[in-house]
Image (spheres, rainbow, N blue to C red):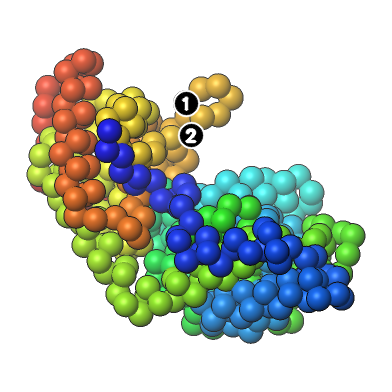
């Protein structure tokens, strides 16, 4: 059976060049980067070369890159490491749970958190950020691109507000890295998180940009690694892979790879909208990263559609998450104003950079077929064209 993988926002495979770069560090170049002998210094040199490559992708100094175990740790380090008791933190209702759950813990530990709403397209208003600033506001945390919808936030405008008011700004750029140019100076952030496995590097490695002068309280204690900001033996193979993936991502941006993927994404979207009634795009009209579409289908469950597509060879993901043994609607889609039923009837399709026209055409044929089949099995209201907030009538 042919299989097409369109769940790149969940994880991506290693690129062949990344695998080739990583392989020696599992075998003959296995040294501990803190050791002073030849093997250790080979590892150290590889870590520092990777740090330069990641810094090049983010347009910052190599000394401002802290390697971590992934984006969740990076987000945790940014929030826990900066906010002190009595501080005020601002974030949004559509953040990844790595930020939102951390914000909940901050509240339990004596910080105050304001969670700002988004509009029907999933975007936050910079004016809303400005409107909730207080003298004790210490940190603003707003993601660059949403993991479910691909909707991009106005982070440069928010960065300017943060700079004007002397507030630190963190952005979770996990779904933006490799898809749009990331310039920490242009964004105006003091902290920025990325994840390796979202951009064709290994799982279990990430990085946090920490602008020079930003003082973070480390989460892990036990060594002087990463300039005392993250104790623990460096994951040399993972770091090397992240560095190589960052280098390839920069090359792809120069070669207009995002534009090619965006054209394929748009082709898939239009084919589905043309063939399926009672459906639409979550985040339609808002700026989105090139590879992501989130589609709602009335009169069916997104989870059932994900399973049906998987059985036919197409990997996508649902617009809901499993919590406490029950399927809950996506907090992102609910924050955008969708009903629980429509949120549960949404799926996310996220293309990887190797996607082809043949892959898109396969998905464009299969998705309408399976939507029709599932609706026949569970007939509800009569067929009709529906629009949601910000989506034009079809």
Q: In this view, does 76 lie above or below 7?
A: below
Q: Is residue 126 left or right of residue 90?
A: left
Q: In this view, does 65 lie to the left or right of 322?
A: right
SS class of the residue under badge 1?
Answer: strand
Q: In this view, does 174 lie above or below 383?
A: below
Q: Residue at x 53, y 55 (%)?
A: 197
Q: Which residue is drawn at 47% across and 29% down?
A: 328
Q: Note whether residue 103 is visible.
A: no
Give how far across and how far down residue 97 sits, in percent: 57, 46
Give how far across and how far down residue 170 sits, in percent: 60, 67
Give how far across and how far down residue 212 sits, in percent: 71, 82
- Of the residues under marks 2 and 1, which one precedes in the sequence? 2
Give how far across and how far down residue 344 sits, in percent: 37, 31
Q: Which residue lies furthest to the right in this view?
A: 222
- Give the residue number, with chain letter if any, for mark 1: 327
Name the one closer to the observer, 76 or 85.
76
Q: How many labels does the image show?
A: 2
Q: Is residue 46 left or right of residue 278?
A: right
Q: Residue at x 67, y 58 (%)?
A: 26
Q: Which residue is drawn at 32% across and 77% down?
A: 255
Name the one closer to the observer, 23 or 56.
23
Give the image quarter of residue 188: bottom right
Residue 349 shows which numbered tag? Answer: none
Q: Note whether residue 6 is visible.
A: yes
SS class of the residue under badge 2?
Answer: strand
Q: Is residue 179 above or below residue 161?
A: above
Q: Are marks 2 and 1 in contact (CB under 8 Å)?
A: yes
Q: Is residue 233 above or below residue 210?
A: above
The crowding category of the residue bearing disc 2, from other C-alpha atoms within 10 Å (few below 14, some 14 to 19, many at least 20), is some
Residue 321 shows which numbered tag? Answer: 2
Alpha carbon distance from label 2 to label 1: 6 Å
């Amino acid at each position: 059976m042919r299989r097409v993988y369109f769940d790149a926002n969940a994880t991506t495979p290693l690129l062949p060049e990344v695998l080739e770069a990583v392989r020696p560090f599992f075998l003959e170049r296995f040294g501990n980067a803190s050791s002073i002998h030849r093997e250790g210094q080979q590892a150290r040199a590889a870590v520092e070369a990777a740090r330069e490559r990641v810094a090049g992708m983010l347009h910052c100094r190599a000394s401002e890159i802290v390697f971590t175990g992934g984006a969740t740790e990076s987000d945790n380090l940014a929030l826990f490491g900066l906010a002190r008791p009595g501080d005020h933190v601002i974030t949004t209702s559509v953040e990844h749970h790595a930020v939102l759950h951390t914000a909940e813990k901050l509240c339990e530990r004596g910080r105050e958190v304001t969670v700002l709403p988004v509009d029907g397209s999933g975007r936050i208003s910079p004016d809303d950020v400005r409107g909730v600033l207080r003298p004790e506001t210490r940190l603003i945390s707003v993601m660059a691109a949403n993991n479910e919808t691909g909707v991009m936030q106005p982070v440069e405008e928010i960065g300017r507000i943060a700079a004007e008011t002397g507030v630190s700004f963190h952005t979770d750029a996990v779904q933006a890295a490799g898809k749009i140019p990331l310039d920490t100076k242009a964004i105006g952030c003091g902290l920025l998180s990325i994840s390796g496995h979202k951009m064709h590097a290994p799982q279990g490695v990430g990085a946090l940009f920490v602008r020079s002068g930003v003082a973070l309280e480390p989460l892990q204690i036990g060594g002087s690694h990463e300039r005392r900001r993250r104790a623990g033996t460096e994951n040399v193979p993972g770091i090397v892979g992240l560095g190589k993936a960052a280098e390839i991502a920069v090359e792809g941006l120069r070669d207009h790879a995002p534009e090619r993927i965006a054209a394929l994404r748009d082709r898939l979207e239009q084919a589905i909208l043309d063939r399926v009634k009672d459906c639409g795009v979550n985040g339609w009209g808002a700026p989105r990263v090139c590879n992501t579409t989130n589609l709602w289908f009335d009169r069916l469950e997104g989870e059932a559609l994900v399973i049906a597509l998987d059985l036919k060879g197409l990997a996508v993901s649902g617009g809901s998450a499993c919590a406490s043994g029950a399927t809950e609607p996506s907090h992102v889609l609910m924050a955008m104003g969708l009903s629980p039923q429509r949120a549960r009837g949404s799926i996310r399709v996220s293309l990887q950079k190797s996607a082809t026209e043949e892959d898109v055409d396969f998905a464009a044929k299969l998705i309408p077929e399976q939507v029709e089949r599932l609706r026949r099995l569970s007939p509800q209201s009569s067929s009709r064209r529906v629009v949601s907030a910000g989506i034009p009538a079809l």
